[in-house]
Amino acid sequence: MRMALALIALGGLVAGCGDDTTSQTGLDMSVPHDLASGAAPTCAAYCAKIQMNCTGGDAGGNEQYLSESACNGYCTTAAGWPAGMIGDTTGNTIGCRLYHAGAAAADPVVHCPHAGPTGGNTCGPWCDNYCQLMAKNCTGANAVYDAATCMSKCAMLGTQGHANDTTGNTVQCRIYYLGLAASAPTNCADAKQVADNPSTHCQ
């Protein structure tokens, strides 16, 4: 009888060691500990991750920000994205960018644009990012388009550019200048279509 009970107990221990990814604390250990904590995504966590995995020195040109401090400034001030949720894979949020910045460790070519300032048409559609920045940074005398006009104008822009492009008739170029507009609203003029501003840098 004692032998049978011992074998049952041993079997229970072995069964508990297989594919169970839950620790004794109740956290899912298949998820990184910082993601399992339930804390909201932060610019600091996002910027540390993207600067680690999206660089200009990897022969892929996957760099999205010149420095971690530049990223933090953009995230907190220029863009002011909502936090979103840990594990977001879409949506114009910090959480989505944090997710793709982490995924970039394995595939930077695919995920760095998603994690960057433009969202790469994954962390928010191109025009959501463009129009959100315009509404935030181009107001009063520097206003460019109202919300409905912004979306219709944006739909006609090219999307073949890259993050931080300063020229080219693309949405990426205009997103770059809308980021600058947070501290220098005169850059709002460069967010216009060429037909509305023939002297825009984005042409």
Image (cartoon, rainbow, N blue to C red):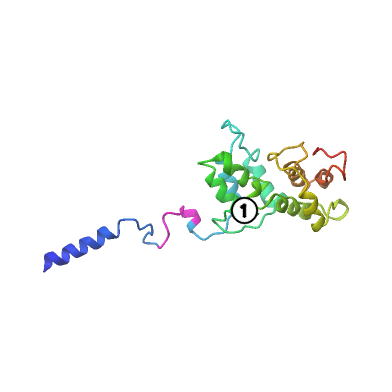
Residue 45 at least partly seen: no
Q: Which quadrant would the C terminus be assigned to in this image?
A: top right
Secondary structure that dominates the magenta span: loop
Q: Which quadrant would the N terminus be assigned to in this image?
A: bottom left
The reply to whether the magenta stretch includes residue 29 is: yes
Q: Give the residue pinned by disc 1.
A: 94
Q: In this view, does 139 lie to the left or right of 12?
A: right
Q: Bounds of the magenta span?
A: 26-35
Does 184 appear above or below 85? above
Is 196 in front, or is 95?
196
Q: In this view, does 145 lie to the left or right of 158?
A: right
Q: Which residue is drawn at 36% across and 61% down?
A: 24
Residue 12 percent location from the top left of the image: 25, 63
Residue 32 percent location from the top left of the image: 46, 52
Q: Quadrant of residue 147?
A: bottom right
Q: Which residue is drawn at 50% across and 55% down?
A: 35
Q: Which amino acid does label 1 sit on?
A: Ile
Q: In which quarter of the image is residue 84?
A: bottom right
Q: Which residue is drawn at 77% across and 47% down?
A: 178
Residue 138 percent location from the top left of the image: 81, 52
Residue farthest toward the bottom in the current orientation of the protein: 1
Does 1 appear above or below 23? below
Q: Residue at x 87, y 38 (%)?
A: 199
Is 153 in front, or is 128?
153
Residue 89 at least partly seen: yes
Residue 190 percent location from the top left of the image: 82, 43
Residue farthest toward the front in the current orientation of the protein: 156
**Callout 1 secondary element:** helix
